Image: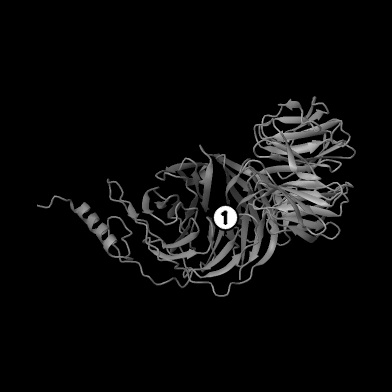
């Protein structure tokens, strides 16, 4: 007697066939069998309708769960002759990290993630750009103003000739990030402090290493460094909260000032060299007597990490800035003065100029501000640097590129002349961008959970949708809209309804990527696994286990035949109809954040944490091109509508446009 109902009997048979026959095509319609999908590769990008399975009436829909396939070692075809990369446009000026003002006060240098911008200090007009391959972290002018010293994220300090912007020397030796650099008052020596736990002294003339000064505690990093005005002393702070004072004539013997309970982020000598000011992650300032190391005052007005300090040249006051963007002015004896508000990010540098009447501030909000010390009035703001770019989208006519930033701004650039057209404000980090099919509107989502509909021509907001949680990912097709929230759910609906009514649940980790099939019948969602949902009913059709999970990005091919998924360094190409693995592409050295198919479907572009953009041929997975000029991870990539160009958005604060070879 048969005790197993026929329905379950058929399911067991199907499961056994899946395990025993490698590479077989699975049945893709629930409740009925269909002929196995052909293995022939597509010859044109003609769209193929992917018919979702029907469900059994009055029964729980059956979901196919496909096992993780076994991937053979190194299946990707080796690249033979990689095409050269041609950069057509660099949109954005990089994220700001530091500033320096020349001794004469005529030049402003701005260190960014892509290099150094030199401005006329009076007009703030750009003079020159010193491009680097790693991004610059710290700056210092020589006392005569002829040299500029920069420390990059590559652990190398670089000397530049200011007159013509030529690189004239490199100081190599540190094994971790250089956190601070300084010239001696006579200009003959350079000091560098590093997170590798050492301070190094270098001879400027030939770059020779003069002294290596280790910190007392193993594992502690040197955070900030400065010479006394007469050059006889060198002071530096450390991550263990100590301040080290030494005589430059005998840099071996060190005196230690103790009082901070957190890392020392910034130090400054008074103009007469008799006092030392220090700021710390413990939210305090300490004022020290240099001669005997006495702690003269402890100031506790800041509510967050003190990130920068500076004495005025006339000795009448000092200033401190913190991680919230607040700047405080103090009397010479530590009497509280004015509070300067205007920055929205950590203060990275404070510099007095104009005979102590002007205070210049640089912030992680990518602005430089100038303040009147007497009344605290803000004179002007330099806001040319750009935030970390999180998303990029191309308008349907190919004329406009949109870049979303970590600061909640959206910049629209005209590709033809590289000009900034509009800047739109959307509160917090942009998590999704998509143009409407007619190119008149732009949809953006942010980490706070709001969706904004923008009218492009005027740069105005037309509609706002609020979600119950922060938004991680977004997909749009026509008026269909789907967002992945940080509570692991997907909200699906139509933008015209002003609400996303349908909630899809089942993922147990954040949904990092979403994509609609070209015929809009399926929604693919990527988390620890790949899931395909019927758009019309919101029914889950298939669960696909993938290697190198979690999925960080996914995309449908233009004809709908393939789905590409990416994770920890590899890309998989799957058949949409049956989940068969077609190809695995390996070339990136780190997580892949974004992918996009070309309009013809014959190429795939990927952007990675390894700072590269890579171009692949579909479906054989041949690596065609590697673009490696970003100085930080690539968060988003997009093809132009005609497929001839690629745009990439990076944490280095730029969107770049490339010619596809």
Q: Nearer the viewer, residue 486 or 276?
A: 276
In the drawing, does residue 182 fall left or right of residue 467? right
Mark 1 residue crowding within 10 angstroms, few (<14) / some (14–19) / many (20+): many
- Quadrant position of residue 502: top left
Residue shown at 86% from the left, 54% from the top = 146
Which residue is tagged 1? 609
Q: Count up the numbered dots.
A: 1
Question: Which sits in the foreground, 132 or 506?
Answer: 132
In this picture the colour scheme is one colour
Residue lying furthest bottom: 80
- Judge whether residue 29 can be spotted in this image: yes
Residue 147, percent from left and from top: 83, 54
Q: Along the line of sight, which residue is nearer the eye, 193 or 655?
A: 193
Q: Position of residue 186 (x, y in %)?
A: 87, 49
- Point out residue 48 in the picture as x, y percentages from the top left corner: 43, 64
Q: Quadrant of the C terminus?
A: bottom right
Could you tell me which secondary element the residue under label 1 belongs to? loop
* Left or right, residue 625 beside residue 132: left
Residue lying farthest left?
Answer: 1
Query: Which quadrant holds residue 578?
Result: bottom left
Does residue 166 appear left or right of residue 238 in this picture?
right
Task: Indicate the position of residue 612 as horizontal and vertical percent values.
Answer: 59, 60
Question: Can residue 642 be seen at all in this image of the molecule?
Answer: no
Q: Is residue 113 above or below residue 558?
A: above
Nearest the viewer among 94 and 558 is 94
């Amino acid at each position: 007697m048969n005790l197993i109902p026929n329905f379950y009997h058929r399911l067991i048979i199907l499961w056994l066939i899946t395990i025993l026959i490698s590479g077989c095509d699975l049945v893709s319609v629930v409740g009925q069998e269909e002929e196995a999908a052909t293995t022939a590769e597509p010859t044109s990008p003609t769209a193929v309708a992917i018919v979702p399975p029907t469900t059994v009436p009055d029964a729980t829909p059956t979901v196919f769960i496909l096992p993780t396939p076994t991937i053979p070692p190194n299946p990707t075809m080796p690249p033979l002759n990689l095409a050269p990369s041609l950069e057509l446009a660099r949109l954005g000026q990089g994220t700001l990290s530091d500033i320096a003002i020349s001794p004469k006060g005529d030049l402003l240098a701005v260190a960014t993630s892509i290099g150094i911008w030199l401005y006329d200090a009076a007009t703030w007009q750009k003079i020159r750009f010193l491009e680097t391959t790693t991004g610059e972290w710290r700056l210092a002018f020589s006392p005569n103003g002829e040299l500029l010293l920069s420390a990059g994220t590559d652990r190398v300090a670089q000397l530049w000739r200011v007159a013509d912007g030529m690189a004239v020397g490199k100081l190599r030796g540190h094994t971790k990030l250089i956190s601070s650099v300084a010239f001696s008052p006579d200009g003959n020596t350079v000091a560098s402090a590093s997170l590798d736990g050492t301070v190094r002294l270098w001879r400027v003339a030939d770059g020779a290493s003069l002294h290596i000064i280790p910190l007392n505690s193993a594992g502690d990093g040197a955070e900030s460094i400065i010479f006394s005005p007469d050059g006889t002393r060198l002071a530096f702070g450390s991550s263990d909260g100590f301040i080290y004072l030494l005589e430059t004539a005998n840099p071996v013997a060190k005196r230690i000032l103790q009082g901070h309970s957190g890392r020392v982020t910034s130090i400054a000598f008074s103009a007469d060299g008799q006092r030392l000011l220090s700021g710390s992650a413990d939210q305090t300032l300490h004022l020290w007597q240099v001669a005997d190391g006495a702690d003269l005052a402890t100031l506790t007005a800041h509510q967050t990490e003190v990130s920068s300090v500076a004495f005025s040249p006339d000795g009448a006051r000092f200033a401190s800035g913190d991680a919230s963007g607040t700047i405080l002015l103090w009397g010479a004896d530590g009497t509280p003065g004015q509070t300067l508000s205007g920055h929205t990010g950590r203060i990275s540098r404070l510099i007095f100029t104009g005979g102590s009447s002007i205070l210049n501030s640089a912030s992680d909000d990518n602005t430089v501000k100038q303040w009147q010390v007497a009344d605290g009035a803000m004179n002007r703001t330099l806001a040319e640097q750009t935030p970390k770019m999180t998303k990029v989208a191309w308008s349907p006519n190919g004329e406009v590129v949109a870049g979303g930033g970590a600061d909640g701004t959206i910049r629209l650039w005209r590709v033809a002349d590289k000009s900034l057209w509009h800047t739109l404000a959307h509160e917090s980090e942009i998590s999704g961008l998509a143009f409407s099919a007619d190119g008149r509107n732009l949809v953006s989502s942010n980490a706070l959970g709001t969706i904004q509909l923008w009218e492009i021509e005027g740069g105005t907001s037309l509609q706002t949708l609020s979600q119950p949680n922060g938004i991680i990912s977004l997909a749009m097709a026509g008026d269909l809209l789907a967002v992945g929230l940080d509570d692991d759910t997907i909200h699906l609906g139509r933008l015209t309804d002003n609400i996303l009514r349908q909630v899809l649940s089942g993922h147990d980790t954040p949904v990092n990527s979403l994509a609609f099939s070209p015929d809009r019948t399926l929604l693919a969602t990527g988390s620890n696994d790949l899931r395909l949902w019927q758009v019309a009913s919101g029914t889950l059709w298939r669960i696909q286990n993938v290697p190198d999970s979690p999925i960080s990005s996914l995309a449908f091919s233009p004809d709908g035949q393939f789905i590409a998924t990416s994770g920890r360094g590899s890309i998989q190409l799957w058949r949409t109809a049956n989940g068969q693995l077609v190809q695995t592409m390996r070339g990136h050295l780190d997580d892949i954040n974004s992918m996009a198919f070309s309009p013809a479907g014959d190429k795939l572009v990927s952007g990675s944490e390894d700072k590269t953009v890579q171009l692949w041929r579909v479906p054989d997975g041949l690596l065609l091109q590697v673009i490696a000029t970003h100085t930080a991870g690539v968060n988003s990539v997009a093809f132009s509508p005609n497929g001839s160009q690629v745009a990439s958005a990076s944490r280095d604060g730029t969107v770049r446009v490339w010619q596809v070879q």
